[in-house]
Amino acid sequence: MYEFDEDTVVEQVGPGVFTGRLTDRWDIGSVPNGGYVLAVALAAVRRTLPAPDPLTVTVHYLRPAAPGPVQVHVETIKIGRQYSTASARLLQNGKENARVLATYGDLSAQMSAPTHVFGAAPELPPPEAATAQSTPGFVPPATAFGRRVEIRPGRTIFDPLQPGEPPELSGWLRFADGRPPDVHALPVLVDAFPPVVFRVLPPGWVPTIELTVQVRARPVSEWVRCRFRTRFIFGGLLEEDGEVWDENGTLLALSRQLAALPR
């Protein structure tokens, strides 16, 4: 079993109640990565709903999580022919850390729908053409989470911005242990790159307030290529928009985060 699968296991202990454990293998500093926390909550949701694929997921982070036992309470809101919806509360020590709302469906049943795509994956050299070690200033610090993923970027965080250019980062991404990406891993992958705001502000802790992930296709390649950008930094808040594509140029997921400025 791959590390991600080991570390997102939940066990049902009652109607709509699951237990699990956040491990320290996905920490940034001493706090578990937000995408990983979401993935643990969704492990309980997908045990509850009949549809296989998370189509849209929103999580509000109420307080920082910590490595250790968790409970996930799932409420089924609707079971439909095409879409099913549930909410989930992830708790530690009796306090709610995250509140999730998720709608699931079957992506394979929608392949015959009309298709019009007006965007494209970022242009990047092949993954083997760049190594993480050749791009200082980009790769996450030598934290536990930084050892779980491999990032091969198109530029470093501290490359100078051109006049009028918004902060943006792009690059290749995969699990370091070779786990093939799937729809259940996308919440972690959209939250794996360093915050784009580091291109304009000094690095620091960037607490996510809300994260939305919209899944559009099932991954079929080892590597995914990502693009993240921020346009509006004011009032103590920022947004970060993300795109995740597979090696064949198929859009896998869109994401948006609302976060506080680096502390």
Image (cartoon, rainbow, N blue to C red):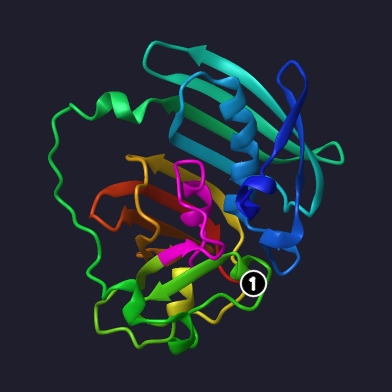
Quarter occupied by the C terminus: bottom right
Q: Is residue 60 left or right of residue 20?
A: left
Report the predominant secondary structure element of the magenta stretch.
loop
Q: Which residue is mark 1?
A: 263
Q: Is residue 154 visible?
A: no
Magenta segment boundaries in residue numbering: 173-194
Q: Secondary structure at mark 1?
A: loop
* Picture mark count: 1
Residue at (64% x, 30% y) in the render: 44
The residue lying at 46 percent from left, 80 percent from top is 132
- Where residue 31 sits in the image (x, y, percent)? 72, 61
Q: Residue at x 59, y 17 (%)?
A: 76
Label 1 Cα neighbours within 10 Å, binned few <14 / some 14-19 / many ≥20: few
Quarter of the rendering containing residue 104: top left
- 176 falls in the magenta region: yes
Residue 166 falls in image quadrant: bottom left
Residue 91 image position (x, y, % from top left): 77, 38
